[in-house]
Image: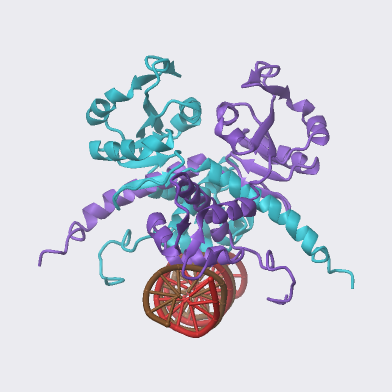
Chain colours: A cyan, B purple, C red, D brown
Amino acid sequence: MLLRGGFEMYNERKISSAVINRLPRYYRYLGDLLENDITRISSKELSTKMNITASQIRQDLNNFGGFGQQGYGYNVEYLHSEIKKILGLDRVYNLIVVGGGNIGQALVNYTNFEKRGFVITAVFDVNPRLIGMTIRGVAVYDVDYMKEFVENNKVDVAILTLPRSQANSIANDLVEWGVKGLWNFSHVDLNMQEDVKVENVHLTDSLMTLLYKINEVETEESVNPQTKDDSEE
Amino acid sequence: MLLRGGFEMYNERKISSAVINRLPRYYRYLGDLLENDITRISSKELSTKMNITASQIRQDLNNFGGFGQQGYGYNVEYLHSEIKKILGLDRVYNLIVVGGGNIGQALVNYTNFEKRGFVITAVFDVNPRLIGMTIRGVAVYDVDYMKEFVENNKVDVAILTLPRSQANSIANDLVEWGVKGLWNFSHVDLNMQEDVKVENVHLTDSLMTLLYKINEVETEESVNPQTKDDSEE
DNA sequence: TAGATTGTTAATCGATTAACAATC
DNA sequence: TAGATTGTTAATCGATTAACAATC
């Protein structure tokens, strides 16, 4: 429970998920800067580009170490590569797709994944019309073969794009067989043990919040027609 | 600026996005309860099912009104229908897909959307091999025709599944032509005016945070091998 | 050196949780 | 009525922002 009792400068305290969720965005902006041959940037400049506060950038980064230099700012290439390491993007990951429907197929066809080191090694489905097929070189297998495959091949992440009813039981199997993370597109909450890592992509939920926002505007405008402009009196 | 100055019991204060993001989840759980013929539920029971606090449920709901009854709890059907209204799901929305690639096509093929009243009315692309085709009955048009289409047909939401480079300029056009909301799958931040409603689905970012979590476990385990079990001494 | 900008502590803000009087 | 559970206020917790000494 000591705050500064350890010996590692890294990984002492649990990093909040608010911070972690921002890391890919930092990584993206730094990649863009790199592409534009910008070699250094201050938290102030970056904050303007990203529309957040410089304070937040410095706080976020200092969760992982001091990557900047007083009076100078941050070296773009260095910071980019450090965030790459923090996110674990400096190695290749093997993924399988469980459920060969629309979304599953779309992800297999998404060539950008491979460029980043996310390799989809197999697709599993129950549909006899899909089994035996190949999607961009990736074989579609019968789910019955999944146990054997996962136990004999390193599978880091399973992408779940299955019907709600099946998601939980298959997720449990996969974890038992050694899969480390679940990227869940099924429209259910997975009830896993504490230590199983899950990231949910609930597309319908996302669309619903957008619809809420759209309607909110419409309501606001009719209720408070005067709030828009107070510059003229 | 008065906190309780208005006459509407509804929509006075800006609801925090933390709350809004939870609404679809409430809606989903209430739908499940309905399907299982459960007619009433207390915040306590629901909190157990959803793995959040009863306090949070009551706070969240009371942003929109008092839907429960002391000593009884909440009527499932009523609460479900109220959240449906709050989210604006009691009407049909017209969507267009801009970018007929993998994800775009997958969304058109996702039949569940239509059941919920999300109707995709057109797909737009630049690829001559796609233009003129039909995906599950939905026509793929040349983007050149998009302005005319949007101006002559009610389009509530544009689903952006295009390359990064094009997303911003097309988004601006769409908003100008009258589209109310943008569901953005392009891997860029859209720079829109304040009042434009955007919901981002950054799949790569989502996967990256999952990879972070996976690696975090591995690191934690090697650094703190003793934290797992303190029940035996 | 003087100016710039970090890393970090302190202050503020907002969201979550706890508590309880109101009331069905 | 007594018990249950809400709606809501107060307390706590955590995340964001501000401030500034350290230092390049």
Left or right: residue A180 compared with residue B38: left
* Residue A3 occupies quadrant: bottom left
- Nearest the viewer among B11 and A87 is B11
Name the residue: 83% across, 33% down.
Answer: B152
Rendered residue at 50%/70% (across/down): B70
- Quarter of the image with the C terminus of chain B is bottom left
Q: Nearer the viewer, residue B54 or B39?
A: B39
Image spot of residue B192 (x, y percent):
71, 49
Quarter that holds the N terminus of chain B: bottom right
Residue occupying image coordinates x 72% and y 37%: B170
Examine the rendered structure and indicate whether residue B73 appears above or below residue B26. below
Residue C6, horizontal then vertical, whole percent: 48, 64
Q: Residue furthest left?
A: B233
Is residue B200 among what the camera can see? Answer: no
- Residue A171 in view in this figure: yes
- The quarter of the picture where residue A151 lies is top left
* Residue A58 horizontal/vertical position (percent): 50, 63
Q: Position of residue A159 (x, y in %)?
A: 40, 35
The reply, left or right, for residue A192 in relation to residue A52 is left
Q: Quadrant of residue B110 in the image?
A: top right
- For image coordinates 57% across by 27% down, the residue present is B109
| Vertical position of residue A148 compared to residue A132: above or below | below
Pick whichever, B183 or A82, lies toward us: B183
Count of numbered labels shown in the rendering:
0
Compared to residue A225, the image places residue A93 above or below, namely above
